[in-house]
Every structure is written in structure tokens, then in C-alpha cells.
Image (tube, grey):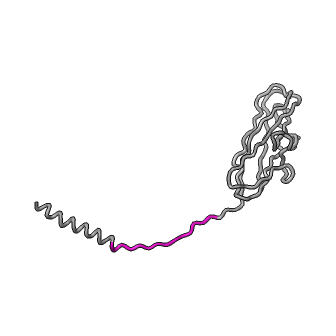
Amino acid sequence: MKRIAFLVPMFVVVIGYCAASRVMAATDSAAFQVTIEIQAACEIAAANDLDFGTHGVLSASIDVATTVDVQCSNTTPYSLRLSQGTGVGASVAARRMTGPGGATITYSLYTNAGRTIVWGDTPAVDAVAGVGNGSVQSYQVYGRVPAQTTPVHGSFLDTVTATIEF
């Protein structure tokens, strides 16, 4: 009984102290600003490979497509360009994949599924113009290997550079 008698007053003292602490607490606050400045900017989010597959004889056109994804800040105008590639003697109208012994296969890249508008490297001429919306925008790149004399067998490669100008 003596223990309970001792604990009760102690409990009352602790509760009283906690209540007094709450009443005496003070606060202060201050506001601060959070800022960011967005400037006109663009980036190529992805430039996906274009694979014409495996073929024996190039007696008919081979058509494939891929995508180039860009992202620009909202309302930022841009021009998306594709280089002529690294093939010897290439132009944007007749790009060249190079294979064994320097043999080449001619191909072209287009902005439309009908493959009538060549995609090139000159803004306001044969590049694709757009305006950023803040999100990733995807562009189809349509490729065609036209019928042509079939070169020696082997792997053929070209490297095209996608550039965004804003």
C-alpha cells in the first residue's frame, strides 16, 4: 500500500509538469519561397536503331520504320535533323550502308509513310520542324532500301546522327 501511495503523488506531479510544459510552449514561423526557372531547352530522349533485317537478293524495296523521341520545354520551337550518315559518297537523298570490301547498299530516310519526303539535315528545307509541349514527342523515321544490284554478302552498317536545334 505504501508503494501505491508513493506512486500516485509522483504520477500527479509528472502529469502536472507535462501539462504545464504544453501551456508554456511558444512557436514562431517564417515563410520561404521555392523557385525554379525553366529556360528554352530540348534533348533527344531516344534515337532507336533502324534494322532492315536479313535478305538474300535486293530485287524489291524493303521498308521499315523506327522512332526518334525528343523532349523540349513547352512552346520551344525546334528543328529535328538527320545527317547523311557516314557512308562514302552518301547524301541525304541516297544514304549508304558500307559492308565487306567497301561495298555499299543505298537507302533513304523519310518523314512520311508514303516515303516521298526525304528527311535531311537542313532546317526549313528537309528537316522536321516542331514546337515542344514539355513531354516526349515521338517521330517516325521511315526507311527504304530500294531494289538495286545485290552486293557481296555480309553485314552492312551506316551511322546517322539525329540533331535537335532550338
Q: Residue 20, image x and y in percent? A: 29, 72
The residue at the point 75 percent across, 55 percent down is 131
Q: Residue 25, image x and y in percent? A: 36, 72
* The N terminus lies in quadrant: bottom left
Question: Which quarter of the figure has residue 22?
Answer: bottom left
Specify whether residue 85 is in view. no
* Furthest residue in direction left, as rendered: 1
The residue at the point 77 percent across, 55 percent down is 78
Residue 34 in magenta? yes
Q: Residue 8, image x and y in percent? A: 18, 64
Specify whether residue 119 is in view. yes
* The C terminus lies in quadrant: bottom right
* Furthest residue in direction front, as rendered: 114
Prevailing secondary structure class for the magenta stretch in the rendered image: loop
From the viewer's side, name the closer residue of 42 and 91.
42
What range of the chain is rendered magenta?
23-36
Asked if 154 appears above or below 17 in the picture, the reply is: above
Q: Residue 129, image x and y in percent? A: 80, 52
